[in-house]
Amino acid sequence: MLYNVVEIQEILPHRFPFLLVDRIISLTPGEYIEAYKNVSISEPVFQGHFPDHPIYPGVMIIEGMAQAGGVLAFKSIKGLTKEEIQQKVVYFMSVDKAKFRVPVTPGDKLVYKIQVLKNKGPVWQLAAKAYVDDKVVAEAELKAMIVDK
């Protein structure tokens, strides 16, 4: 484990119930990150999606991948201090080629694997995949930008 949830909160502004990354387990700055989220039946989203047949929403999977990508972007900028990170935020710019392959349900460990496709200044283009038990459950190309708050 590289970063636990407390350390992730020092990087990302998200908090419960919208912090969707529990741990960072691998990170190569400028290239790759692997993170995960444990999906629990106690998540507020399951009150309405769907009460008798709980399915973790695809939009939440995309957001979790984007949050992991945000950690990758911040940790790829050389010399950026914790104080400087707290003065910046990652804005989601686009989602392309999104596909949802298998439903995610309570009890699943959702693993995010994100690769940098392109980085130009503050803009990051990422190839993102989400897995449960080594099976791809979702994938997308994401674009984000780091900006001052």
Image: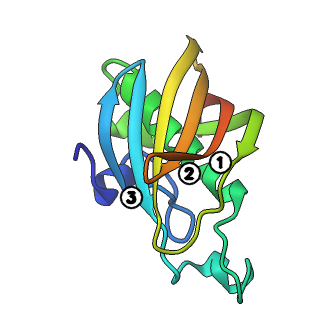
Label 1 residue SS: helix
Residue 147 seen by the camera: no
The image shows residue 53, relative to residue 78, as above or below, that is below
Left or right side of 146 for 87: left
Image spot of residue 7 (x, y percent): 29, 52
User: Residue sitting at 47 percent across and 66 percent down?
Assistant: 108
Q: How crowded is mark 2: few (under 14 residues within 10 Å), some or many (20 or more)?
A: many
**Nearer-the-camera pick, 22 or 89:** 22
Residues marked 1 and 2 touching at CB (< 8 Å): yes
**Nearer-the-camera pick, 11 or 136:** 136
Q: What residue type is labelled 3?
A: Asp
Image spot of residue 58 (x, y percent): 70, 56
Q: Which of marks 3 and 2 is nearer the N terminus?
A: 3
Pick out the residue farthest to the bottom. Answer: 52
Here the colouring is rainbow
Q: Quadrant of residue 5?
A: bottom left
The image shows residue 90, relative to residue 62, as above or below, that is above
* Residue under numbered circle 3: 22
Quadrant where the C terminus sits is top right
User: Residue sitting at 56 percent across and 51 percent down?
Assistant: 64
Q: Earlier in the sequence, mark 1 or mark 3?
A: 3
Instruction: Measure the C-alpha gap from mark 1 to mark 2.
Output: 5 Å
Label 3 residue SS: loop
User: Residue sitting at 41 percent across and 52 percent down?
Assistant: 36
How many marks are shown on the rendered structure? 3
Residues marked 1 and 3 touching at CB (< 8 Å): no
* Residue under numbered circle 2: 64
Residue 57 seen by the camera: yes
Instruction: Measure the C-alpha gap from mark 1 to mark 3.
Output: 15 Å
Left or right side of 43 for 36: left
* Residue under numbered circle 1: 62
